[in-house]
Image (cartoon, rainbow, N blue to C red):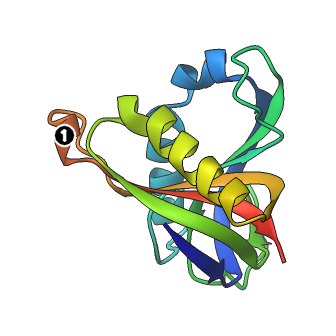
Amino acid sequence: MQTKTIPPIHVLYFETETSLNELMGYVRLVAHRLYREAIRKEMEITGPIYWIYNGADGNPETRFNLTIALPVSVYDAPLTDSEFSLKYLETFNCLAGHLYGSWEGLGKIYNELISDVLAKNLIMSGENREMYLNMDFQNPENNITEVQIGITK
């Protein structure tokens, strides 16, 4: 587990209100559309897909804000004729850890990170991020995911 400060990131993004029970409706589909849109608009893709959770508390029924974001180079022209928007993600202080393997292990890494946050007397910000460094849908044991628990400084 490592404390990090993530600098601002310029992203093409999708936002919705959802619950943990409804997440499967966004897996693969939104990321695919984000990549396709970035290419259509001739944007340079500068990083992996992020899933950003604001207000998720682990309860499968709790409604929260989900942002799915693709880092892209700064785009000077106004973004028109798109289902997505552009913005900067603000500087993000977090405690981060890596999950190597299937996303079925996400609960375990979250528990480990939250335990570490509490042991270090840190305060959670209510925002968590998952950065998908490698997504292998045919061989999920090859997935690499960085989980970031937001903390206040």
Q: Is residue 133 above or below residue 136?
A: below
The structure residue drawn at horizontal position 46% and vertical position 61%, both measured from the top left corner, is 97
Q: Residue furthest left?
A: 139
- What kind of element bears circle 1? helix
Q: Position of residue 80 (x, y in %)?
A: 76, 60
Which of the pair 131/34 is nearer the observer? 131
Q: Is residue 63 above or below residue 49?
A: above
Q: Position of residue 69 (x, y in %)?
A: 61, 57
Q: Position of residue 117 (x, y in %)?
A: 68, 59
Which of the pair 79/94 is nearer the observer? 94
The structure residue drawn at horizontal position 18% and vertical position 47%, both measured from the top left corner, is 142
Is 87 placed left or right of 133 in the picture?
Answer: right
The structure residue drawn at horizontal position 66% and vertical position 81%, both measured from the top left corner, is 75
The image quadrant where one finds the C terminus is bottom right
Disc 1 residue type (three-letter): Glu
Q: Residue furthest front?
A: 119
**Does the image show residue 79?**
no
Is 64 placed left or right of 96 in the picture?
Answer: right
**Does the image show residue 119?**
yes
Determine the image quadrant of residue 4. Answer: bottom right
The structure residue drawn at horizontal position 47% and vertical position 77%, both measured from the top left corner, is 46
Which of the pair 37/46 is nearer the observer? 46
Which of the pair 28/136 is nearer the observer? 136
Determine the image quadrant of residue 90. Answer: bottom right
Crowdedness near tag 1: few (<14), some (14–19) or many (≥20) residues, C-alpha within 10 Å: some
Is 129 placed left or right of 134 in the picture?
Answer: right
Residue hosting label 1: 141
